[in-house]
């Protein structure tokens, strides 16, 4: 029982670490603020929520597990809001898009 | 030339990951399993990438994005740290850090828009 719990928790933690490291490679590698924001927000949020879910599985329904689920729900709710606000602020402060980008709908809408 | 740069970067990354995963890390705390210490150092590699983007970002928006990412990574770091030590107040730190990171990201976005903080 406990061994199976630990195994599933380790699998979730390895998955989360993989997502984290790919998100950080995206932050390092992609050419533009908007591309970097897209890569980091999706990958790192999913990876950290996966690590927290693995903690919940390994620790069960104690104080630690319930706090982990609480943090995961809070992170899933607030991280896209913060990313949207950052992208809007970057666009309004005049950061140029990558020269090979195809379309900029936010500019065309007249904002 | 571009392929060579890609290959050098990929080689450095793969070598550091292999070094972290294969190096026998001594027991820093009372680790129940040595595997979590390796996870700890993989997250340190992610922190190093974020700090590079904070230092070398061409625009202020890049730095704001890297700081936001760093906050989310620290939450996962606290969660991993709470498993082998068995102390649940690390997740209290995680809750507080998530709140602080969210409010900080909103303030940075407001600053990037060029408006004042009092609206």
Image (tube, coloured by chain):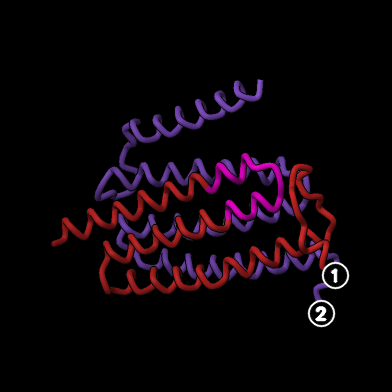
Q: Residue at x 86, y 68 (%)?
A: A110
- Quadrant in the picture for the N terminus of chain A: bottom left
Answer few, some or many: residues within 10 Å of disc 2's Cα (few below 14, many 20 plus, some between 14 and 19): few
Element at badge 2?
A: loop
- Residue that sits furthest to the left in the current view: A1
The residue that disc 2 covers is B119
- In magenta, the rendered stretch is A23-40
Q: Residue at x 81, y 50 (%)?
A: A96
Residue A62 picture location, percent across and down: 28, 73
- Residue that sits furthest to the bottom in the current view: B119
Query: In the rendered image, which quarter is residue A90 located in?
Result: bottom right
- Quadrant in the picture for the C terminus of chain A: bottom right
Query: Label 2 vs label 1: CA separation?
Result: 8 Å
Query: In the rendered image, which quarter is residue B64 located in?
Result: bottom right
Would you say the residues marked 2 and 1 are in contact, meaning their CB atoms lie under 8 Å apart? yes
The residue that disc 1 covers is B115
Q: Decide if residue A27 is on the left or right side of residue B34.
A: right
Instruction: Give the main secondary structure of the magenta stretch.
Output: helix
Q: Decide if residue A43 is on the left or right side of residue B63.
A: left
Badge 2 sits on which subunit? B
Residue A9 picture location, percent across and down: 28, 57
Rendered purple, the chain in question is B
Residue A12 picture location, percent across and down: 33, 55
Residue B26 on the magenta segment: no
């Amino acid at each position: 029982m406990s061994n199976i719990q630990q195994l599933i928790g380790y699998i979730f933690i390895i998955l989360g670490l993989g997502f984290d490291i790919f998100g950080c490679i995206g932050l390092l590698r992609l050419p533009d603020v908007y591309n970097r924001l897209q890569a980091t927000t999706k990958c790192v949020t999913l990876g950290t929520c996966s690590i927290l879910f693995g903690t919940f599985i390994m620790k069960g329904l104690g104080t630690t597990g319930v706090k982990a689920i609480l943090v995961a729900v809070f992170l899933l709710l607030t991280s896209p809001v913060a990313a949207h606000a950052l992208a809007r602020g970057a666009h309004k402060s005049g950061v140029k898009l990558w020269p090979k980008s195809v379309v900029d709908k936010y500019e065309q809408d007249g904002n | 030339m571009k392929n060579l740069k890609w290959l050098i970067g990929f080689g450095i990354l793969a070598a550091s990951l292999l070094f972290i995963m294969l190096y026998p890390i001594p027991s820093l705390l009372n680790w129940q399993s040595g595997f979590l210490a390796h996870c700890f150092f993989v997250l340190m590699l992610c922190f190093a990438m974020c700090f590079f983007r904070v230092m070398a970002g061409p625009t202020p928006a890049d730095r704001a994005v890297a700081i936001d990412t760093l906050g989310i990574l620290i939450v996962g770091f606290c969660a991993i740290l709470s498993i082998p030590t068995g102390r649940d107040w690390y997740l209290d730190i995680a809750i507080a850090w998530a709140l602080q990171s969210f409010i900080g990201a909103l303030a940075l976005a407001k600053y990037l828009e060029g408006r004042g903080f009092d609206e």
